[in-house]
Image (spheres, rainbow, N blue to C red):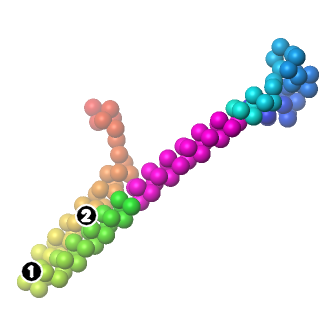
Amino acid sequence: AVFASYRSGAVSDQAVEKTEDWGLDWEDIRVVTAITTLFEVFYTNTCYARYNTLYKNTRSMLADAANYSYMLRVFVSENAPRHARLASRYLMGGVLLHFFDLKNMHTRADLQ
């Protein structure tokens, strides 16, 4: 905001001098900019770590669902093919319902 105000002419050159009452010291601005950059990088790193955790958990869940379907096909489908197919359909329905629920997640306050 300070930079934009200065560049647009809202803050005159005389007001930038430290001797003025509302003067700006560019060393102070440099410190504020460094701290802001540090917090932005820290926040971005935290968001990326959360995304990676969510991605790994989602991939693991989908791999487990695929493995379960494969095991049903190998061990159950020979004796009870309709049961294996129904169990696979329930599994896929549960996975889809899980993602649908996450997409439309409500807080506890919304539910009360």
Tell me the chief SS of the magenta region: helix
Give the answer, above or below, for where 85 lies relative to 17: below
The three-letter amino acid code for the residue at tag 2 is Gly
Nearest the eye: 45 or 58: 45
Q: Quadrant of residue 68?
A: bottom left
- Separation of residues labelled 1 and 2 (CA atoms): 20 Å
Query: Count of labels shown?
Result: 2
Question: Considering the numbered disc 1 on the image, is that residue within a helix, a strand or a loop?
Answer: loop
Q: Give the label on residue 93, or none.
A: 2
Question: Residue lying furthest left in this view?
Answer: 79
Say which residue label 1 marks: 80
Give the answer, above or below, for where 13 lies relative to 48: above
Q: Quadrant of residue 62?
A: bottom left
- Name the N-terminal-most of marks 1 and 2: 1
Nearest the eye: 5 or 94: 5
Q: Residue at x 83, y 14 (%)?
A: 21
Q: Residue at x 85, y 20 (%)?
A: 18
Indicate left or right for 66 with 21 as reference. left
- Image: magenta residue range: 33-55
Question: Considering the numbered disc 2 on the image, is that residue within a helix, a strand or a loop?
Answer: helix
Q: Does the stretch in magenta take in 80?
A: no
Quarter holding the N terminus is top right
Bin the neighbour count of mark 2 within 10 Å (Cα to Cα): few under 14, some 14-19, many 20 and up: few
The spot of residue 94 in percent (x, y) is: 24, 61
Quarter holding the C terminus is top left
Indicate left or right for 110 with 38 as reference. left
Q: Residue at x 41, y 60 (%)?
A: 55
Give the answer, above or below, for where 110 lies relative to 70: above
Q: Give the label on residue 12, or none.
A: none
Q: Residue at x 17, y 83 (%)?
A: 74
